[in-house]
Image: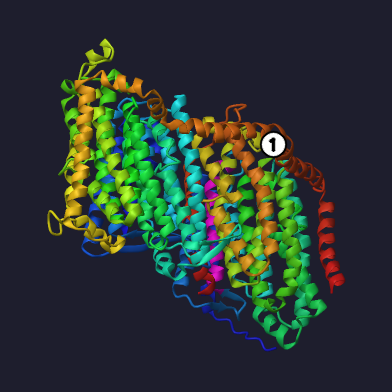
Amino acid sequence: MEMETTISLLDIRPLVPELTMICVGLIVILLDLIVRKKEVVAIVGIAGTLVALYGTYKLYGFYEPQSAFSGMFVLDGYSNFFKLIFYLNIILTICISFKYMAIEKASFGEYYALLMFATTGMMIMASAADLIVLYLGLELMALSTYILAGITRKRQRSNEAALKYFFLGAFSSAFLLYGISLTYGLTGTTNLREIASALQTLDLNGSPIMYLGLIFMIVAFGFKIALAPFHMWAPDVYEGAPTSITAFMSVGPKAAGFAVLGRVLFGAFAGMQVQWASILIPMAVLTMAVGSIIALAQTNIKRMLAYSSIAHAGYMLLGVITGTTGGLMSTVNYLAIYLFMNIGAFAIVIMLRREGFQGENIEDYMGLSKSHPLASALMLIFMFSLAGIPPTAGFIGKFYVFMEVIKAGYVYLAIIAVAFSAISAFFYLRVVMYIYMKDPKEEVVLTRSPSMSIALAVTAMMVLILGIFPSFLLNLVRYSILG
Amino acid sequence: MLKYTLIPLLPFLSFLINILFGRNFIKDRAHWIAVPAVVGSFLLAVSAFLDVAGGRDINVNIYSWIVSGSFNVSVGFLIDRLSAIMLIVVTSISTLIFIYSIGYMHGDGGYYRFFAYLSLFVFSMLILVMANNFLLMYFGWEAVGLCSYFLIGYWFHKKSAADAGKKAFIVNRFGDFGFGLGVILIFLTFGSMDYMQVFGEAGGIAGQTINLLGYDVNLITLICLLLFCGAVGKSAQVPLHVWLPDAMEGPTPVSALIHAATMVTAGVFMVARCNPLFNLSEVAMNTVAIVGGVTAIFAATIALVQTDIKRVIAYSTVSQLGYMFLALGVGAYSAAIFHLYTHAYFKALLFLGSGSVIHALHDEQNMQKMGGLKKYMPVTYWVFILATLSITGIPFFSGFFSKDEILWRAYLAGDLGKFLWFLGTLAALLTAFYSWRLIYLTFHGKFRGTHEQEEHLHESPPVITVPLMLLAVGAVAAGWVGIPPIFAEHGDKIGEFLAPVLGYPEGEGTHAQEYFVMGASIFVAVAGWIIAYTMYLKKTELPQKLGAAFQPVYKLLFNKYYIDELYSKTIVQPTLKASDKIILGFDTYIIEGIVNGIPNLIGAFSRKLRKIQTGLLSDYGLIMAIGALSIIGVWIFLR
């Protein structure tokens, strides 16, 4: 196979947003040495992200799917929509971390820089049209998040989380590389489009080795998304990591994982839909089951939300399983909604943390409505949305995924999903019950900050707006994916 | 587009602002938000009315919430001649009642809450009226019911008020259940819930039947009867009328707005809106007409002997709503809407006037303890007189024209129509009697209350009397848009205006017949007046004697035909008893078993499963490996 090898400087252009993120990340590290006030560092980080967002928007402005570096890197609606999710994810994360990291005594420049590097990794993943580029992005994201999980160096749980995440992540990377090498061995290419055509021309759709390669890649992506049975790291890491990072990780890497899963399965292995669906269906059912059932027994809210995020990954996976564009769109739509409701919920969790008080037990929420009616109402909105109760966005997310699943003929999957969704309502509503129907044990003081208020306002508004006016987001998703 | 969207949106914003910031910030300034909002709605409604009158119907989808195949949950407005009139009625009366409430609710602890709910009600009512599909109408339908529940039970610390709220809600459940089924059946039949599509295709399925419990039932008839169930509940028709008199426990502005002028007429509006469906089913039409006629006379008889001033007016409302259904049932849709429109003004006026009286007497509602208020409250007295002249159908007052139109159309509608005309005319006699009885007991004669009350008697402040005077203008003049053609060529402006939507009723009679019908209704109006005058002003001992002579009849009427007791014995008590048993047996062991059992079971399972999460890195790695291997293994075995 002949490779186009000339790389011109123009190829850099689609990468401008990624480069911006990297550069600003480096600036942030340097700035940290000079500036006392960490707020400045954080604001520079947000500003850099906004510049990158503007870059993506500008590139999208003369939108024609562009590719660079011999087709290894693409810029299309699909990748740009995911990048929007990543940008929002990092901005909201910085907003909610601000005061919190100060309390945790870990508000270094590196924290913000690593968030930006991790986000860059995700962006590269979303744009990857080649397995090698995909791997590069994935490792950049993974290495940064390993460190972020352990950034509160003095806390043992944080260290433990980082170490576990690192070892298991390395394990999953091995799976990925093995899968890539098998694929390369059979098709002679790592480019997704060429893999797709090779599968046709070489008639590899039924090949056992190809299948093995696919399984290995799915294992690796499943690890990032936290699909059962590759989810074992998630509860421990989510609980041990600083809460802001937990919020960041529960959305960003998951979305990035779905981005590459969708790209690889729909781009390269579209012809093997029957095969990969048969792998993913049991995984999805197991994921929903593990997430919804084990969450019931949790007493720590971060752990509960960790299992909740596993369960949500299961619902999102259903859209991918359909193998239809509509299904993929419903998953992407769900991810965008999940971003707001999940970060919102974590923001409330963070507010309970103060000097000398963890505020991570569900019991800490008892009677919160008596002392903090507004925060309670917000938590109610987020919990309703996570449980999928209308008119919140969570309902819309689930509705469209289930609808696509039924359209694609997997009625039984939709029934199973609704059943688990009903079970999961139990633990979300338990939080609401604690807030509204129990008497307060001790007085809870909330840690407030302006940036936190902004983040809460944005997330809560979006959860309600997208619940009542879902067509805005749906149209954006449709436009992004169908062009 | 924004203009039309703002009509319901303004009251909704007022609701949001008052409910969110009322308790801490707005407090007793709530009317500064609510009144401008409803005035804004009114002005926009007038503008929309002019657009429609200029020949431009508006039918737009504002947005779709969920679209899935043919199932389309969308918010869309249809403003045609029918809804334009409803918009004017709802917003104009709301405006006056909001202003009145400033004075009436002054100093109430939940002032902001009152205006918040009232605004929410106006929003819901406007949605109900403006909807262009059945689902949105259903939303509005349920939302007004909810607001009504909130507002009847507004003084929720009072047990009777809380109970009345519950009663209204539960009784309406019966009707709404049917209404909901009707909407579902419409969707199943037409594959759409959009008015235009449903009405357009209705002709095509006329005569189609479905099998129901072994009987072949006409589909359209079934749909219409189910929808009408909802109307019977919401508009308090026999046999679901029992909630409305109790609903008088709510503050008087609520009685005037919700339980006289607007919400209770929603059923009338709905049937008129669905006229393309009802026209196809004679059975449904006759049912509507008979229920209406029976209700008109039935409620009027009860009103004869009640002593609570608001309850008399409440039964009068039920009776007048009966007239409207009677008109709908004989196909005189525009006459029904005409009466809805005039009734809204004079009935709101009667309620607000009674509110003024109650206010002056410090919450006394028993007419036996009133009397002679004329000299203390001249404004209230005179507006009451005007409203009474109107409701009793004295010529050239609003009520005369609309009631006459209904009776005339009934008279023309065959044998059943003649019978209904007779019922209606008889009810008019009773109406005249109980309305003047109310006036004489309240305003004439000697004051029968306590000495202390007498000292505090005073006319209400302008914030109350000005809305009364404005409503009085409506009560007198609103009917002038519907003058019968025998008096003036093209005098029936409202009928002609509504004709494109509702059709113009067929049937022609001779002038002699028309004068006869009119003469009969004028005769009974005057006769009722004279009887009341004789009994309550001249020979005041007569009521006592009559009551004693016809003890059983009096008791039957005073106890409202024992309907409440009947329902209590046959439905409420057995239900309570049965539910007690169910709670003791079934619920404790089976439901609780399931409700607690499943979570407990899953919880136990969950706690077991949780143990897999050992926290040991090597275990996690092992599980990942086993997972990957089992996927491969399963595939090998299944291949």
The question of residue A98 being in magenta is answered with yes
Magenta region, mostly helix, strand or loop?
Answer: helix
- How far across and how far down the image is residue A419, in percent? 68, 53
Residue reaching furthest to the left: B488
**Is residue B619 shown above or below A256?**
above
- How far across and how far down the image is residue B261, in percent? 31, 42
Q: Which residues are magenta?
A: A75-101
- How far across and how far down the image is residue A334, in percent? 58, 59
- Quadrant location of residue B95? top left
- The residue nearer to you, when weighing B397 against A13, is B397
- Callout 1: chain: B
Say how the picture is coloured.
Answer: rainbow
Q: Is residue A30 left or right of residue B515?
A: right
- Quadrant location of residue A220? bottom right
- The residue nearer to you, when weighing A125 against A375, is A375
The question of residue A315 being in magenta is answered with no
Rendered residue at 49%/78% (across/down) = A64
Q: Tag 1's secondary structure?
A: helix
The residue beneath circle 1 is B587
Disc tally is 1
Rendered residue at 17%/54% (across/down) = B512
Q: Is residue A385 left or right of residue B362?
A: right
Residue A143 appears in the picture as rendered? no
Rendered residue at 53%/68% (across/down) = B69
- How far across and how far down the image is residue A436, in percent? 57, 34
**Is residue B143 shown above or below B449?**
below
Residue reaching furthest to the top: B451
- The residue nearer to you, when weighing B133 against A237, is B133
Q: Amino acid at mark 1?
A: Asp
Label 1, residues with CA under 10 Å away: few <14, some 14-19, many ≥20 = some
Q: Is residue B619 left or right of residue A61?
A: right
Quadrant (top left/top right/bottom left/bottom right) for the N terminus of chain A: bottom right
